[in-house]
Image: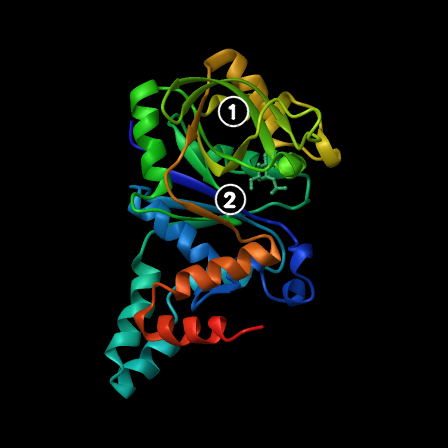
Amino acid sequence: MKIKKAIIPAGGYGTRFLPVTKAVPKELLPIVDKPMIQYIVEEAKASGVELIILIVNHGKEAIEDHFDVNYELEDILNKKGNHKLLGLIEGLSDMIGIVSIRQKRPLGLGHAVLQAKHLIGDEPFAVILGDDIIDAQRPCLRQMAEVYERYGKPVIAVQRVPREETSLYGIIKGRQTERGVYTIEDVVEKPSPGKAPSDLAIIGRYILIPEIFDTLEKVPAGAGGELQLTDGLKELLGKKGMIGYEFEGDRYDGGDKLGFLLANIAYAMKRPEIKEKLLTYIKGFR
Ligand code: G1P
């Protein structure tokens, strides 16, 4: 079954990026000249998604504006005859269907996902986390949708991380069934390196089934006192099974200062008009 809807939780406070995130949503910080969330939405669209469900909180209106029509700007660009930029701006608002829902309290990722329950209905859907930017030839979510087609079970993107970083991620315990594909036996949210069942970390891409909502309604608050999506997954995998998929592509942690800067360099290197000058600058840097 096609994955037509994707939930993008954007309700965080972006504290790791203060002070810039005091008034600017983290999701709108630019990688070269596009906000981070646009990369995520473009990946969803390229993977066949037709509707984005944004979970926002107070102060995130600018994200909605970014994907909305801006008549004034279009009019100005039109009058100036700047059709290239006009096309770019119009393309953004025409790109994909978007609705947004308010998460009224910051009660965790599981809670954020739960807010979209009434919009999902009886079909599999995706959850994409805006911090994880994945540069891949075949969009990561599309790769995952193909795995879902084959196995008919929820699919979670995973990637190996250094052991000392397990406490930053949900970590899976899995049995490899084919190259890059694991039958998940357990998931633990942010275990210390000593307690981590493996070095396979959950990266922010999930293909889930509506049953996850029932589980999320039942699980108690977990790590950090928040309703954790990982705890819902743990319940669900016992009932429905779950697949871990090691995707092909480069992942950048846009929620981390270094990861964000590396993403900027990597994407800037893809721009012929920037690449050479940037390389010259970096080579001369001490
Ligand atoms: C969330 C999830 C975690 C996952 C991570 C991926 O954590 O709770 O399981 O590994 O995203 O980026 P967060 O980064 O929001 O703390």
Whether disc 1's CB lies below 8 Å from ligand 1 is answered no
Provide the residue designation for mark 1. 212
Q: Is residue 185 above or below residue 161?
A: above
Residue 218 vertical placement versus 34 (above, below): above
Say how the picture is coloured.
rainbow
State yes or no: discs 1 and 2 in contact (Cβ < 8 Å): no
Q: Where residue 90 sits: x, y (%)?
A: 30, 67
Foreground residue among 151 and 94:
151
Tell me the element at label 1: helix
Classify mark 2: helix, strand or loop: loop
Q: Amino acid at mark 2?
A: Leu
Q: Position of residue 131 (x, y in %)?
A: 53, 49
Disc 2 residue lies near ligand 1 with CB under 8 A: yes
The residue under label 2 is 129
Q: Is residue 71 visible?
A: no
The answer to which image quadrant residue 138 occupies is top left
User: The disc labelled 1 sits on which kind of residue?
Assistant: Ile
Instruction: Count residues near mark 2 (Cα–Cα under 10 Å), then give few for <14, some for 14-19, many for 20+.
Output: some
* Marks 1 and 2, how far apart at CA: 17 Å
- Residue at screen point 58% across, 72% down: 286
Residue at left 68%, top 39%? Answer: 107
Q: Is residue 49 visible?
A: yes
Can you tell which mark lies on residue 171? none
Q: Position of residue 50 (x, y in %)?
A: 32, 44
Q: Earlier in the sequence, mark 1 or mark 2?
A: 2
Give the percent coordinates (x, y) of residue 1: 29, 26
Q: Residue 163 is drawn in which quadrant?
A: top right
Name the quarter showing ligand 1. top right
Q: Nearer the viewer, residue 195 or 62?
A: 195
Tell me which residue sits at (57%, 30%) in the image.
199
